[in-house]
Amino acid sequence: MHSCKTLPRTHRERSASPTEPTFSSSWTPARREPYTRAVPRAGVAAMVVFALGAPAWAGRIHCTPDSVPVGPVCVDTYEASVWSIPASSSRLIARVQAGKADAAELTAGGATQLGAIPPSGCTYTEYPDSFPATGSWTAPLYAASVAGVPPSTCITWFQAEQACRLSGKRLLRNEEWQGAAAGTPDPGLSDDGTTTCATNSPFAALTGARGGCVSSWGAHDMVGNVWEWVAEWVNPATGCTSWDEAHGGDLSCMGLGSSTSTTLAMSVGAVTSREVVSFDPNLPGAMIRGGNFATGTRNGVFAVFTGVNPSNISRSTGFRCAR
Ligand SMILES: [Ca+2]
Ligand SMILES: [Ca+2]
C-alpha cells in the first residue's frame, strides 16, 4: 500500500531538480513588456522556451496589476494613495487588496482618498482618529497603487506601514527600493515640468503623470515627487552630505555630522518651508528615499534621509508598498 508512494518534494529539491529550468539574470531592455507574464509552470515547456532564448523576464514572478516584478518582489508601480473604503464595500476592498482597483473604480465605489499632498503644511488632521499617528487603528484605511491621483503624505511611518498591510502589502526594504529605482532618470534642476521626474517643480505631480519618470523595472516616480518611507529603522542622522556627481549629487543624511540634530531637522524642514518636522536623536531614525518635487539636484535614486523619527509627518513624504 505504501510501496509506490513518493514523498513530497521539498522546496530545496524542487529548486535543484534537473527538470526545472533556471533563468538568466541578465537584463534584456528591448523586451521589457509584458510585466505580468506568468512564470511558465511546465518544466519541459519552459526548458524549450528557455533554450530558444526566452527573455530574462520570463523567469520573473507574476505580479498584481498595480505592481511590477523586481526580481522576486512585486513593487507597487506608483507612490501610495490612502483610501477610506466603506466597510460594506467588501468587493471593492478585495479588489484593492488584489491590486486590481484603479482610481476611477475607487471613486465610483464610494472610496475617499485621505492625505492627498496638501498645498500648504500638514495639519495633523489628514487622517481620522480611528487611524492615528501611532498606527493603532480601529477602522482600516487602505494603501493603493493607482495612477492619476496626488500621492498621500503627512503620514507617519506607523500609519504607512499599517496601510500597506491592510492592503495585503508591506513597506519596501531599503535594498528593494534601491533595486526598483534603478534606471530612473534624474533631471535634477532640469525638471521640465511635464514629462521628467518632478525634482524642481512648484508642487508634486499626480502619480504616474510624469511619463518619463520610470525605472528600468517600470516603477514610476521613484526620483522626486514625494519622499518614500522604507521599512528600516536606523540610528538617526545628525548630519548630511551629498553623493558625488556620478551619483546625481543626491542628498545623503545618514550617520553623524557636525551639525546638531536640531539644525539638521530644521534645515531639512525649511527646504520647502512647509514641512512639519519633529526630531529626537535618541528615538529611532526611519528612512525615506528618492527626494521630493522641489529641491533639485539633491533628489535622485541615491537620495537617502534618516534624520526623522518614524513618528514624523511631512508634506513631502509619502510611501510605496510591495508584496
Ligand atoms: Ca517618489
Ligand atoms: Ca540628483
Image (cartoon, rainbow, N blue to C red):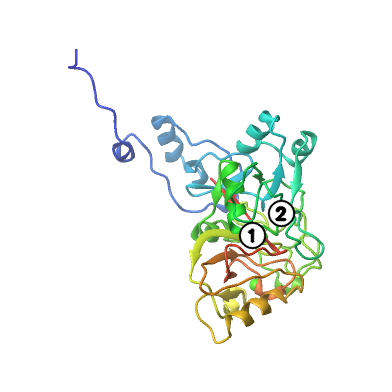
Question: How far across and down, in percent of the image, does residue 310 sit?
Answer: 57, 62
Q: Residue at x 66, y 34 (%)?
A: 93
Which residue has dot 2 on it?
152
Residue at 51% x, 67% y: name it: 284
Image x and y of residue 113, in percent: 75, 46
Mark 2 CB lies closer than 8 A to ligand 1 = no
Residue 308 in sight in this render: yes
- The image quadrant of residue 169 is top right
Q: Residue at x 30, y 40 (%)?
A: 12
Seen from this angle, which residue lies furthest top?
A: 1
Considering depth in this image, is 99 or 193 the residue closer to the camera? 99
Around disc 2, counting alpha carbons within 10 Å, would you say few (fewer than 14), some (14 to 19), or many (20 or more)?
many
In the picture, which quadrant includes the N terminus? top left
Q: Tag on residue 222?
A: 1
Give the answer, above or below, for where 92 lies relative to 218.
above
Q: Is residue 178 above or below residue 168?
A: below
